[in-house]
Image: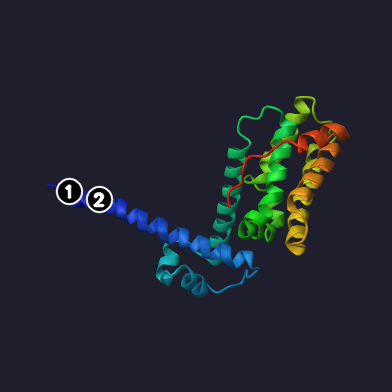
């Protein structure tokens, strides 16, 4: 006979994970639309779960929103890791990450809006674009590719450019997102110490496919 009781915890864990994921997705929907003070009841209704289920996972709306942001940052970071795998030149890695992030504002508008609505958190988080940009800047300095007096101030400029570019692309849908992202990336590479020709050449290299 098959011991059915051994399967119960697995089913329970799957149900719990499904409920938590539904709440996180609901929170991201509200964050993307700028509704940061939505009642918990409305969150649970959107997620199609009971009020009691909410408190099985989160103590407050703020805790849920934090989890929703962390999930968005993790998704963004994992995608950048996947799409820059195998690149050796830190200048190329930096450029490819920034160019792809610029394109994601149109390919993943909900994810983009979640990140933009928490812009200051995005710039200091240990997940997503920020830690990877810091790593690439430091690697570029050590490899002699970048000439930067203050890496932290350079990171401030990079983060500001990423956020402002995203907002610009949402505000002006007629703009070419790829062209805008590549132009800003060129300017950032020049700021980091590359020549105009080097920066332009790197930003003309083909990118991996972005799904979605």
Q: Residue at coordinates 72% horizontally, 31% vertically from top-left? A: 90
Q: Which residue is mark 1?
A: 3
Q: Left or right of 21: which side holds 192?
A: right
Can residue 21 be seen at all in this image of the molecule? yes
* Along the line of sight, the residue nearer the viewer: 105 or 161: 105
Name the outermost residue toward the left.
1
Q: Residues within 10 Å of mark 2 (few under 14, many from 20)?
A: few
Number of labels in the image equals: 2
Q: Is residue 188 above or below residue 72?
A: above
Q: Residue at x 71, y 56 (%)?
A: 119
Q: Residue at x 69, y 58 (%)?
A: 116
Residue 194 visible in the displayed image:
no
Seen from the viewer's position, the closer of residues 95 and 17 is: 95
Q: Is residue 147 above or below residue 115?
A: above
Contact check, label 1 and label 2, Cβ < 8 Å: yes
Res. 88 image quadrant: top right
**Residue 18 sits in quarter:** bottom left
Residue 54 in percent (x, y) is at: 45, 66
Query: Is 57 placed left or right of 11 in the picture?
Result: right
Q: Position of residue 14 (x, y in %)?
A: 36, 54
The secondary element bearing badge 1 is classed as: loop
Residue position marked by numbered label 2 in the rendering? 7
> Residue 67: x and y, percent?
54, 56
* Residue at the image position 77 percent from the left and 34 percent from the top: 202
Left/right of residue 74 with respect to residue 130 in the rendered view:
left
Q: Residues within 10 Å of mark 1 (few under 14, many from 20)?
A: few
The spot of residue 66 in percent (x, y) is: 58, 58
- Measure the alpha-carbon separation of dots 1 and 2: 8 Å
Foreground residue among 75 and 121: 75
Dot 2 lies on which element?
loop
Outermost residue to the top: 143
């Amino acid at each position: 006979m098959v011991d059915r009781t051994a399967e119960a915890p697995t089913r329970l864990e799957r149900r719990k994970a499904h409920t938590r994921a539904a709440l996180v997705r609901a929170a991201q929907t509200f964050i993307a639309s700028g509704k940061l003070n939505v009642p918990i009841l409305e969150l649970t209704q959107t997620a199609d779960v009971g009020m009691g289920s909410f408190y099985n996972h989160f103590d407050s709306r703020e805790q849920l929103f934090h989890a929703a942001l962390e999930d968005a940052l993790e998704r963004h970071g994992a995608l950048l890791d996947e799409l820059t795998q195998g690149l050796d030149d830190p200048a190329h890695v930096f450029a490819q990450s920034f160019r792809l992030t610029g394109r994601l504002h149109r390919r993943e508008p909900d994810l983009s809006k979640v990140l933009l609505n928490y812009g200051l958190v995005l710039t200091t988080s240990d997940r997503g674009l920020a830690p990877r940009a810091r790593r690439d800047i430091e690697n570029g300095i050590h490899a002699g590719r970048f000439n930067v007096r203050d890496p932290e101030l350079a990171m401030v400029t990079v983060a500001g450019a990423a956020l402002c570019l995203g907002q610009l692309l949402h505000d002006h849908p007629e703009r070419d997102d790829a062209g805008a992202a590549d132009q800003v990336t060129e300017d950032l590479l020049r700021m980091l110490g590359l020549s105009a020709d080097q920066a332009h050449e790197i930003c003309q290299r083909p990118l991996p496919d972005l799904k979605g």
